[in-house]
């Protein structure tokens, strides 16, 4: 018990990655990997600043982290003369993407979290136009106060600040007192306070009384505000005055009442608004057709279309996940995150451990002699049952790469023998004592996919470890940062436990496999998103069918199946004909229970693959590779859903 308590007391940043819990700005910035930030801004760079952007992602995917990075205090902290030591790579990425310019911030960002006060506005006994006006005023006043708080937080005097409005805004300037930054802030504070009093009243005032005593004028600074000009930087007094682009980031926008969210979104789409604005939300509030359209465009043509986003006339949807066509770009992100987190663990630093892969990448396991003997006996029995002579068996064995380990080679030979048997004429047509020495199948070498299929067979038959090593950990993460950190955290916990017990920090393949599968099963059991029970049942039925196909003795798909393939033309009709199925699939895609792979060409047909996410694959012992699928129809897919429940 004492050892367990010591382990828990250790700092494992993989278990504490909720960056919003880190209050010190420097500490936060030192943890942040620049690679996800670079990926986020890789495309749509200008539209992310000019248009309303819906940043959509599941909990823990990194939405809030990116929002915190682009806040003014973060950008300014990184611009301090000694701050490059904090995270120079992050400074470089932000500079390349125009958020830092000439050594100072280029945007004045502030993040507003949607508290219950915002939603409570919609519960007030007022007309819809009045509630909408209150919501707009509350958001804008909070943004203004947040911007000035960020400036003062970095030591910038408001006497050195100028509020720059657009043309023909004299009336707004006069009402809001924009010519005096201090008075401008006080006016915003009075608006916020008036609305706060109304929202928190035990008995809300009548609408007419509210207008007379609390607030009877609109507050629309977003439509006329252009820049906030800083005339003097405390840490760089020789720099010329700089105009900052105001930026408002609304976090947890899904917490709003659905109609309220739509009103907010539609207002912020306006082209006359000069303020940069992001709405951070979960996929729950995005319509299934919009969400699938983003995924489809991401996969169909990465070169022509903007990956990870869909462009409307008025706003942008940006997914906080890499599309299925670009999973390979997640590898440097995962490696960078793991090295930063490992470097911050004191126990590892004392032992010179600086990265995760050396603790995970080891020689593949080999079955013990008893199980190897059993495999040999199975080969001999198959040869007898199939009437294969020694020459034929040796010919098949020669097709297996010499790099295959002994147990893998035997399992692969067993698969090839079953394939040969399926192609051999029926036994009852052969003479009773006839023996086959010439193969019927072609002489192609067994590829890496077949060897991997042999490993999966060994995993199911002998519990031989399969999910181990850094490559498997990255593949198991579905290009999702939170999933990578959660899975990696379970392995780091095990390494820390070994260190406390005085053992080697290197994890055996068996230990890694057990931890990853256990974590996958636990995470699936903890799914709590809408329709989670139906999603869980759907992926279980898909996994069972894939497992049956994968474990066929002749391994018809080499390393097996992990997807259902629906003809693309049928899938295109899903929203019209199968509304219930569409909603279930929406949340399955959003939470990576299934991966959406449209326009997949195979056998002279175009398919839409519903690929199991990595967690269900590990929970059911399936391949993490893409391509192996079972053909089905849309009605067949719908039949897998439970008859009732949500």
Image (cartoon, rainbow, N blue to C red):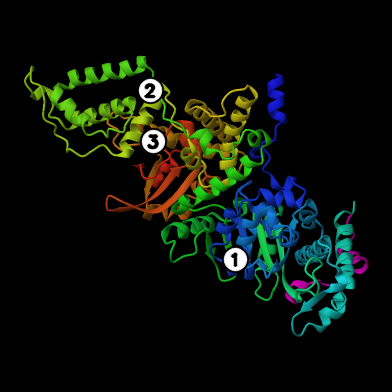
Q: Quadrant of residue 53?
A: bottom right
The residue sitting at the right extreme is 213
Disc 1: which residue: 96
The mark closer to the camera, 3 or 1, is: 1
Q: Quadrant of residue 515?
A: top right
Circle 3 residue: 546
| Marked residue nearer the N-terminal end (1 or 2) | 1
Res 644 visible: no
> Which dot marks residue 461?
2
Q: Secondary structure at mark 1?
A: helix
Q: Which residues are magenta?
A: 203-226
For the residue carrying disc 2, how many other residues have a C-alpha within 10 Å: few (<14), some (14-19), or many (20+)? few
Circles 1 and 2: CB atoms closer than 8 Å? no
Residue depth check, mark 2 versus mark 3: number of the one nearer the observer: 2
Count numbered badges in the picture: 3
Who's the residue at 53% across and 28% down the image?
507
Camera-side mark, 1 or 2:
1
Which of disc 1 and disc 3 is earlier in sequence? 1
Residue 464 shows in the view: yes
Q: Residue at x 17, y 33 (%)?
A: 423
- Viewport quadrant of the C terminus: top right
- Residue at coordinates 58% horizontally, 64% vertically from top-left? 316
CA separation, marks 1 and 2?
A: 52 Å
* Horizontal and vertical percent position of residue 584: 52, 45
């Amino acid at each position: 018990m004492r050892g367990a308590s010591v382990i828990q007391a250790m700092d494992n940043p993989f278990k504490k990655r909720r960056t919003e819990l880190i209050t010190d700005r420097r500490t936060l910035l030192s943890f942040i990997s620049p690679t996800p930030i670079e990926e986020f801004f890789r495309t749509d760079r200008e539209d992310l600043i000019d248009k309303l952007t819906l940043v959509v992602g599941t909990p823990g995917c990194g939405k809030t982290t990116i929002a915190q990075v682009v806040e003014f205090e973060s950008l300014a902290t990184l611009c301090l003369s000694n701050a490059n030591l904090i995270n120079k790579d992050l400074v470089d990425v932000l500079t390349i993407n125009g958020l830092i310019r000439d050594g100072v911030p280029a945007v004045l960002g502030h993040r507003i979290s949607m508290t219950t006060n915002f939603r409570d506005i919609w519960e007030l006994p007022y007309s819809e136009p009045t509630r909408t006006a209150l919501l707009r005023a509350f958001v804008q006043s909070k943004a203004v106060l947040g911007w000035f708080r960020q400036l003062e937080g970095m030591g910038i005097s408001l006497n050195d600040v100028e509020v720059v409005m657009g043309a023909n805004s004299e009336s707004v300037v006069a009402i809001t007192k924009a010519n005096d930054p201090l008075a401008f802030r006080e006016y915003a504070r009075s608006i916020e306070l008036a609305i706060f009093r109304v929202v928190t009243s035990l008995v809300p005032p009548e609408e007419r009384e509210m207008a007379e005593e609390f607030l009877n004028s609109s507050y629309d600074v977003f439509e006329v505000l252009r820049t906030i000009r800083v005339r003097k930087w405390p840490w760089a007094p020789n720099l010329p005055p700089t105009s900052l682009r105001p930026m408002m980031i609304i976090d947890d926008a899904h917490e709003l009442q659905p109609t309220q969210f739509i009103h907010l979104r539609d207002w912020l789409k306006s082209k006359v608004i000069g303020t940069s604005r992001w709405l951070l939300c979960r996929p729950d509030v995005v319509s299934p057709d919009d969400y699938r359209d983003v995924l489809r465009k991401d996969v169909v043509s990465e070169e022509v279309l903007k990956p990870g986003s869909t462009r409307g006339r008025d706003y942008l949807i940006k997914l906080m996940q890499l599309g299925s066509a670009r999973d390979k770009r997640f590898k440097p992100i995962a490696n960078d995150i793991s090295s930063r987190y490992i470097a911050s663990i004191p126990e590892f630093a004392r032992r010179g451990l600086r990265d995760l892969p050396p603790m995970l990448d080891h020689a593949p396991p080999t079955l013990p002699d008893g199980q190897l003997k059993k495999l040999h006996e199975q080969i001999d029995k198959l040869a007898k049952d199939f009437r294969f002579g020694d020459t034929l068996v040796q010919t098949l064995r020669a097709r297996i790469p010499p790099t295959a380990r002994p147990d893998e080679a035997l399992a692969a030979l067993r698969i090839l023998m079953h394939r040969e048997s399926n192609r051999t004429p029926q036994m009852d047509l052969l003479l009773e004592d006839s023996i086959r020495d010439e193969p019927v199948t072609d002489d192609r070498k067994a590829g890496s996919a077949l060897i991997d299929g042999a490993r999966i067979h060994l995993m199911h038959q002998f519990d031989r470890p399969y999910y181990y090593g850094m490559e498997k950990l990255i593949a198991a993460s579905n290009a999702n940062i939170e999933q990578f950190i959660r899975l990696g955290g379970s392995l780091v916990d095990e390494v820390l436990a070994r260190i406390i017990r005085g053992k080697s920090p290197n994890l055996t393949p068996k230990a890694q496999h057990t931890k990853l599968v256990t974590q996958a099963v636990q995470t699936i059991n903890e799914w709590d998103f809408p329709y989670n029970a139906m999603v869980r049942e759907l992926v279980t039925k898909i996994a069972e069918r894939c497992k049956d196909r994968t474990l066929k003795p002749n391994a018809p798909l080499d390393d097996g199946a992990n997807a259902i393939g629906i003809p693309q033309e049928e899938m295109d009709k899903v929203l019209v004909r199968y509304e219930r199925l569409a909603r279930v699939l929406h949340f399955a895609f959003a939470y990576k229970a299934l991966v959406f792979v449209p326009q997949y060409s195979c056998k002279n047909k175009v398919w839409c693959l519903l690929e199991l996410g990595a967690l269900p694959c590990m929970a059911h012992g399936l391949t993490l590779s893409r391509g192996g699928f079972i053909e089905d129809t849309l009605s067949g897919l719908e039949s897998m859903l439970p008859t009732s429940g949500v």
